Image (spheres, rainbow, N blue to C red):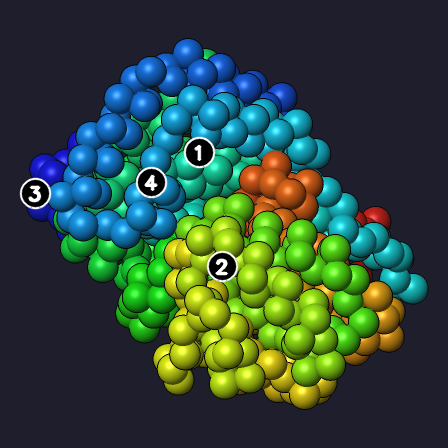
Amino acid sequence: MKDIDNIPALMADIGARAKAASAALASANAERKHAALISAAETVWQRRAEIIAANAKDLDYGRDKGLSDAMMDRLMLNEERVQGMVDGLRSVAEQPDPIGEVLAEWDQPTGLNIKRVRTPLGVIGVIYESRPNVTADAGALCLKAGNAVILRGGSESFHSSQAIHACLQQGLRDAQLPEDAVQLVPTRDRAAVSEMLTMTDTIDVIVPRGGKGLVGLVQRDARVPVFAHLEGIVHIYIDKNADPEKALKVVLNAKTRRTGICGAAECLLIHQDVANTIGQGVVHALIDAGVELRVDEALSEIEGTKAATADDWGHEYLDMIIAAKVVPDLEGAIDHIRRYGSNHTDCILTEDAQAAQTFMNRLDSAILMHNASTQFADGGEFGMGAEIGIATGKMHARGPVGAAQLTSFKYLVTGDGTVRA
């Protein structure tokens, strides 16, 4: 390891070792990758007390920094959440290995047989904030897809990430795969992030996972290609034909289950025809659950609400706060979401199949839902085992980024002494 105080040299060394590891990992068979992930899962559980003790140091650091309750919740690990990491590692391990999958195959009149097959991207840089479980998720998914990964966790989760990373490396050793396949940047110095963004010779893609500030910095300064994971300005629209019971259940879950995740609902739109019925019932239920409602004029007479300002539309709270507004119709809801949304996740609650279809056709968010909580905007819930983030851009990967999305492809062309006329 290079001098930790010499950031350019440190990152150059990490990059060179990742690139070398990626070459070995690209040809590793599915059984060895599976074995590494299962061993990592077992090691995480065996060392859960060490991981939780490391997390306690991070929680102290977070309190000293004055992190919000929502951010502290994102940071906190307990035995249940460690079990969730173990389950995620095992789930990724059991996913089909994407490398070598034949995506398409055809024969040309010239006699050529052509196959398009999945191949690793190479080296992935993941820059993330707060949530230490991303260390396990990102490391597992990159390994599954045959990629080496350089992890740069947030300063808040520094000790937790180190403890989790040690478990991943144990898994690699047990499976006789290169430890350098999963590396963790061993410093809180932000200069390491700046270095990663320009390491075009060794990093093939950067995945930022965090708030608008982090993602904006990465998109602005990166010379390496980026899978953007923008903020989750998640809308739920209650249509005039919504089922009252479903609306109540879904909205409460979408807002209150975990407020600090990117799939948490941040804005509630209510069709004017049901504003005084279903709408009022949902608003009262949210208030009773401890949610602060910032509302437009049409809802302002409901006791316990606060008047919304212009800044409340298009705001990601990650807290027990939601903006709410009455819209004239489905078109009004679509217009609002197009103006203020982040193309992450949006939901319609309705029993009208045509309205649901129109909502899904007219909006271009990465995830569109009908009668389901937006808290399902998660790779694990999509059957991917875990996710490295929700990509909101349109190039290469979109929505939950699992192992298959962390691949590219190549063409395998076979002839029989075939020449071109």
- Distance Cα–Cα, label 2 vs label 3: 50 Å
The residue under label 3 is: 5
The residue under label 2 is: 287
Secondary structure beneath dot 3 equals loop
- Distance Cα–Cα, label 2 vs label 1: 36 Å
Mark 4 vs mark 1, foreground winner is 4
Q: Residue at x 16, y 48 (%)?
A: 65
Of the residues under marks 2 and 3, which one precedes in the sequence?
Answer: 3
Instruction: Name the spot of residue 182 as percent of width and height, x first.
Output: 39, 34
| Disc assigned to residue 238 | none
Q: Is residue 392 visible?
A: no
Q: Residue at x 60, y 81 (%)?
A: 326
Of the residues under marks 4 and 3, which one precedes in the sequence?
Answer: 3
The residue under label 4 is: 75
Instruction: Name the spot of residue 67 as percent of width and height, x first.
Output: 24, 50
| Crowd around label 4: few <14 · some 14–19 · many ≥20 (10 Å) | many
Q: Residue at x 75, y 61 (%)?
A: 244
Image quarter hosting the C terminus: bottom right
The residue under label 1 is: 136
| Crowd around label 1: few <14 · some 14–19 · many ≥20 (10 Å) | many
- Distance Cα–Cα, label 1 vs label 3: 26 Å
User: Mark 2 is on which residue type?
Assistant: Ile
- Callout 1–callout 3 Cβ contact below 8 Å: no
- Distance Cα–Cα, label 4 vs label 3: 26 Å
Mark 2 vs mark 1, foreground winner is 2
User: Mark 1 is on which residue type?
Assistant: Ala
Of the residues under marks 2 and 4, which one precedes in the sequence?
Answer: 4
